[in-house]
Image (spheres, coloured by chain):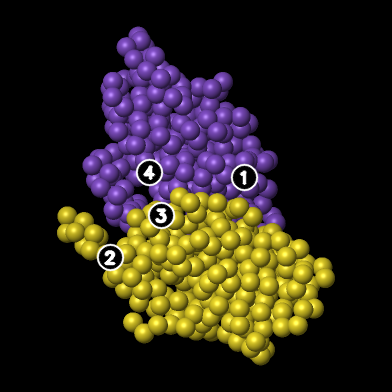
Chain colours: A yellow, B purple
Amino acid sequence: MQEEIRNSDYKYRVETCFFPQQYPLYAEDMGIVVVIDILRATSAMVAAFESGVDRIIPVSTIEEAREYIGKPGYIAAAERNGEVVEGFAYGNSPLAYVDQDLRGKTIVMTTTNGTKAINLAKDAPRLVIGSFLNLSALSEWLVSQNENVLLLCSGWKDKFNLEDSVFAGALVERLLDSGKFGVEEDSSIAAKFMYMSARDNFMSILKAAPRRRRIEQLKLLPDAKYCLTPDQCTVIPILRNGELVRMVPQPA
Amino acid sequence: MQEEIRNSDYKYRVETCFFPQQYPLYAEDMGIVVVIDILRATSAMVAAFESGVDRIIPVSTIEEAREYIGKPGYIAAAERNGEVVEGFAYGNSPLAYVDQDLRGKTIVMTTTNGTKAINLAKDAPRLVIGSFLNLSALSEWLVSQNENVLLLCSGWKDKFNLEDSVFAGALVERLLDSGKFGVEEDSSIAAKFMYMSARDNFMSILKAAPRRRRIEQLKLLPDAKYCLTPDQCTVIPILRNGELVRMVPQPA
């Protein structure tokens, strides 16, 4: 009974949606949507802003991105099935943006899963980009806001994705620990359970990953190690008028 | 590298599908589908066969079930949203079937999620019914077969369901431990992670469950305790010509 009372004490909800297609089932009353595509779109976006990029325009098709190849001030990036699309110099590797000076540049990016999730949720009141890279900065900002938060995993070609869900679990735990948030959905508890099993060694996610994906991931092991190392960045990308920009945090 | 070799050693796959709607994405090459609706449809089915029922006919609509009310030899059972449907004496409570002599009887049953999942997968080569109640009997039988196994969770009104997924994780672990099975899908690893977090106390699933469902579950606490206690039954229901019957295990 006491637990029942304690449980209704929270002011805001943090919930998890494992699949972009299920977004409409979870979107109601959500003031902030966090889009998650750990390997590698949202990690790459955070890394690019950390390197000073002005804005990132997420587009759905390769054709839209191709128009920007060679255009001064623009970087055109396109990934499908884990590979850089032919004709493009950039895909979704975050390491391509690390230790570069990208100030004044605009990235136009299309990826298999991540930009699709952004597009689906683009009408959310606020949409921000999450990754292990900005885990602490993002969770502190979320706790400082007074909104329900939806964690939107990008999945892998309409199927369940492990690393996105483990990261969602990391955010669920931090927001629950703040005492300001509670959960109503089983998916949020499940994400937290997954995070609890993986937390002591994020690289174990890759070891646990099925063979097909493991081979892909070994190929991009430096990328994966980078994407699974928390708190290398403090920037939070936010969607404004269809473009991702660097959030300038407001004083609380 | 060595791990890579070891990983390709298995002969069969065990995979997990969290949502009935995603069944077509996972169904290919699956010789056996295990339908899971822990609270409470598949637990009730196992309990009924343990009490001797001849067959269970899963139907999709309340109207179909209603035709059997009062018909000699039949038990008509209908549940929607956790409640017994008006006019029916039975819903999906397994305790209604425990310690009864149901020999010679046929149950006609419709439930919110479980019978829907059975209907979706009814064309699988073999479809069996799983629950904590028959966990050991079922996992031993699955290991004795030479087939890929798909664990089909019923979900909760198209959303993710925790107890179904934790049970899937229990089966994944047992089948992996046999050395005969491997996984390719992230969802199977995720289910195992969830099971690892919940295994020492299945009732913790209810404690972790969100408020709305917790209240529902407190109302049916005796049912939930029964459904979450492994290995009270040894029967395995199997679908034959649209009807669930008791499997008579063949010698290996």
State yes or no: discs 2 and 4 in contact (Cβ < 8 Å): no
Residue at position x 77%, y 68% from top? A66
The residue that disc 1 covers is: B26
Of all chains, the one bearing label 3 is A
- Occupied quadrant, residue A140: bottom left
Which secondary structure, mark 4? loop
The residue that disc 4 covers is: B230
Asked if badge 3 and badge 2 are on a common chain, one would say yes
Residue at position x 40%, y 34% from top? B112
Left or right: B131 with respect to B97?
A: right
Tell me the quadrant of the picture where the C terminus of chain A can be found.
Answer: bottom left
Of all chains, the one bearing label 1 is B
Of all chains, the one bearing label 4 is B
The Cα atoms of the two marked residues, 2 and 4, are separated by: 37 Å
Q: Which amino acid, mark 1?
A: Tyr
The disc placed on residue A161 is none
The residue that disc 3 covers is: A28
Work out whether residue A108 or residue B208 is closer to the camera in this orientation and state it.
Answer: A108
Residue at position x 68%, y 73% from top? A108
Task: Tell me where residue A95 appears, x and y as whole percent.
Answer: 67, 81
Work out whether residue A124 or residue A93 is closer to the camera in this orientation and state it.
Answer: A124
Which secondary structure, mark 2? loop
The disc placed on residue A11 is 2
